[in-house]
Amino acid sequence: MSQNIVDYCIGLDLGTGSVGWAVVDMNHRLMKRNGKHLWGSRLFSNAETAANRRASRSIRRRYNKRRERIRLLRAILQDMVLENDPTFFIRLEHTSFLDEEDKANYLGADYKDNYNLFIDEDFNDYTYYHKYPTIYHLRKALCESTEKADPRLIYLALHHIVKYRGNFLYEGQKFNMDASNIEDKLSDVFTQFADFNNISYEDDEKKNLAILEILKKPLSKKAKVDEVMALIAPEKE
């Protein structure tokens, strides 16, 4: 059985959120098939840029690089520091949130009073903060002094310089209250919190979504905090 073969053209109208199409013969008349005109459109969601996702990846890379810089700094100075104070890094990492009894159990015979940074007889946290109210006072003093400094003070000053080196990521940017990709932003908050407090954190997408649902509930701030803390179940450290 023979079939009529005709020439035809397909026209497309491409948009950012739709595609229109039509089939016409060589005389530009709309063609039919099975009694229906061959034309129509397909709608779809507008494409979104990867700017937000890219920013989240950039933040994670920046914090990974920060941790690596601090690790390298410690590798360079640890022999000098540990020779003077064997438990300095242990106290610096693990005792900030422990009470006095737990600190004594954790550090054993090396623990003295309820201090975190310095436990010497003639130099402790009280005398340190009295002499250097902020880290910038310490940095200034070390820059201007010609005397041999305590290796721990040198480490603290360099640690601050290496960790907070400054950035230019906000120049020319406009900030808004865009709530898109809120899951990624919440994950970044936990990552920054864990990095700032030197604690381990495993990203859990399901847990983050559950936290967002808690925050949407019509509850008091205290009730939301209680539910979120029960969900996170943080360890004492």
Image: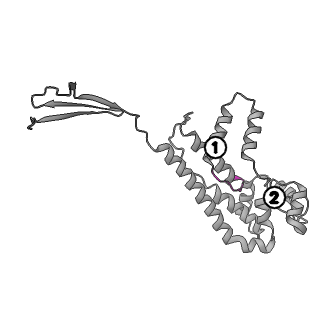
The boundaries of the magenta stretch are: 196-203
Give the number of marks. Answer: 2
In the image, taking residue 161 as reference, residue 11 lies left or right, namely: left
User: Is 199 contained in the magenta span?
Assistant: yes
Q: Is residue 177 magenta?
A: no
Q: Main secondary structure of the magenta part?
A: loop
Q: Considering only vertical position in the picture, is 30 above or below 144?
A: above
Looking at the image, residue 224 sits to the left or right of residue 1; the answer is right
Q: Which residue is mark 2?
A: 95
- Residue 41 placement (x, y as % from top left): 30, 29
At label 1, the amino acid type is: Asn
* Mark pair 1, 2: CA separation: 28 Å
Residue closest to the eye, 203 or 134: 203
What is the number of the mark on residue 208? 1
Left or right: residue 170 compared with residue 47: right
Residue 136 falls in image quadrant: bottom right
Q: Nearer the viewer, residue 184 or 159?
A: 184
Compared to residue 137, the image places residue 8 above or below, namely: above
Q: Is residue 129 above or below residue 44?
A: below
Mark 2 lies on a secondary structure that is: loop
**Residue 189 location (% of width, % of height):** 64, 45
Q: Which residue is farthest front?
A: 1
Tell me which residue sits at (73%, 35%) in the image.
224
